[in-house]
Image (cartoon, rainbow, N blue to C red):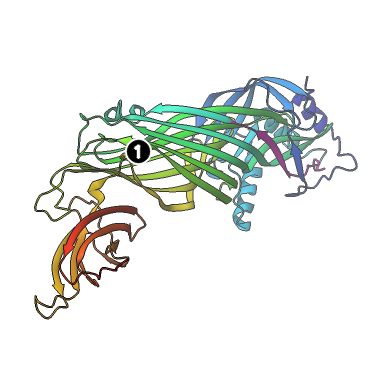
Amino acid sequence: MKTTVSLLAVVLLAACGVEAPGGESPEQSRDALQTAVVDPAPGTLAPPTMQTLTAGDGWRQVAVSGTFVDADTGTPGTVSGQSLIIIDSPAAIAASPLPEVVKAELLAEAALDTVTSDPGELMWVVDEAGAGAYAMSQDPKGGTKGGGQAVARCADYDSTYSHGWNPSVTRNFSLGQLGAELQNAGSMGFTIGAGVSGALTLRIKRFWAVLGCVPYAVGFRKISLTAQANVEGRLQLLGTQGAPANVVIHRERELAKVDIDSWAFFVGPIPVVFGLSVPIEGGIDVTGGLATSVNLTAHIAASYTVECTSGGCTTTKTATRTLENNGGSGLLNARATVSPWVQASLRGYLYTDAAAYAQVGVRGNIAGDLWAYTGATCGDGDGDGFNEQVRALTLDVSAGVDLTARVSVAGSTRWQASWPVISSARVGFFDLLFGGSNAAQPMLSVVSVGSTGKSPLLPGSPILTVAGKMRPCWPYANTMGYRVLWGDGQSSTTSAAPQTAFSLTHPYSYGGTYNVRLTAQTDAVGRQVNQTLARSLALPGMLPPVLGP
């Protein structure tokens, strides 16, 4: 069991004039010591409990119970109903129920932070009994101790406490959890595996007692998280013919919060809880319809270090991502944009989420542009005077990866930001129909057939002029690149707006029947269409010579 000193005995001995022994500086010195304490005992104990007793504007009195380990030795100890005062901001110090001498100490700390432009503490946690003992040791009888002799005081110091976790979390959610209108529309899922190390940097304030310097308050200065995370996000839309064709949906929410582990340790007599949870948030934006099915899987590998203080977070980060298209189907004559996102965060919290936390998240963004068509109102591709029956189902996907960070104290967001680790970029243009989307084929028409001949009796070489453009149901406006194979071993390339006809002229050496092929290749933003329409054209003109045996 952890051995603790009676605070009443501390006060009485301090009042009797016991001085600091050699080797312990009696002077108050900011940042006098800097120590690093590595977690000596992974958090395998049941998490402590914290109950709010009273509260005011920016402060709370809480009772903490549970088993904690000594940060130096790993020896466990138990507390029951230990009273702590949690101060959420410097402005709340004056109104808190702390002794005046303790208020003065904390206010002086805040003032010095302002002068030095130090971000200061996220929050202060003060041991109520320790604060009372410190106040009594300073002036137990209303005057100065020992007839004017000052009580020895202990140096403040910063100490860093670290802990490691290896969370592995898999969750699957119905899209109906994002909104009733998405009920039975599909699902999204999430898997994260990570190696995480977290560190707390604390400012520890102490007073002198007979057995040495005793901490009475800790200020939380910095939370650091370093992680190697592998994230998989999954989206499946289950298209149905009865789904509405024109909807606008925007939904987002926290889908789950998985508590991984907490490390409960003592800083002197003060119990501290440092825990890790994985909140999973998701959202989806839909414009158009949900009658088309899609099945996508995104993989993200991220490495990052984030250090958060009351003034914000700094970060270093890298990430990679891949996207798998697992197919789709549908017969919806419409265009719909479906943009799902899912975010998994690693949240380092102090005592509870409601007290304070810093979190960093990996957010995968997918922008899916679905185009579905079936019918005979999408143009005459081969120029025979009749519209063809064509169909299409394509998915244009862009994806990016953002790193997000947030600092919250007492349920209020102090700071948040996001950084694009991988800027949103086109992942691919997918044709989801077996056999291909022939509605994405261009249209090819003959403008004219000329000849180099001087008269019908002296036929020359044919000259063919053709025109081409995308079908009218093609939904995108970006300039398209085309290639024409003239059927004689020659080719030409050009580009034009999809609904603006281009024309190309090609001279042939001889008359005859040629298989002319027009291919829509890649548009200006990188959609690789590669759909071809072919026409067999009989061209008049001089025939090639017949070679004998």
**Image vertical order of residue 493 relative to residue 180, above or below:** below
Query: Residue 199: horizontal and vertical position, in percent?
Result: 66, 40
**Image vertical order of residue 384 relative to residue 126, above or below:** below
> How many other residues sit within 10 Å of disc 1, few (<14), some (14-19) or many (≥20)?
many
Left or right: 306 in relation to 186: right
Q: Indicate the secondary structure of the residue bearing disc 1.
A: strand
Q: Nearer the viewer, residue 224 or 16?
A: 224
Left or right: 427 in relation to 292: right
Quarter placement of the N terminus: top right
* Magenta range: 148-167
Would residue 108 be seen by someone viewing this image from the given angle?
Answer: yes
Farthest residue, direction front: 549
Residue at coordinates 17% horizontally, 53% vertically from top-left?
381
Left or right: 263 in relation to 296: right
Residue type, label 1? Ile
Q: Is residue 160 magenta?
A: yes
Query: Residue 545: horizontal and vertical position, in percent?
Result: 25, 71
Q: Is residue 219 magenta?
A: no
Q: Nearer the viewer, residue 224 or 292?
A: 292
Farthest residue, direction right: 22
Quarter placement of the C terminus: bottom left
Q: Please tell me how many numbered marks the rendered image carries.
A: 1
Query: Residue 339: horizontal and vertical position, in percent?
Result: 35, 42
The image quarter in which residue 194 lies: top right
Residue denoted by label 1 = 284
Left or right: 167 in relation to 145: left
Query: Residue 16: horizontal and vertical position, in percent?
Result: 84, 32
Would residue 88 be seen by someone viewing this image from the given angle?
Answer: no
Q: Nearer the viewer, residue 469 or 342?
A: 469
Residue at coordinates 13% horizontally, 46% vertically from top-left?
377
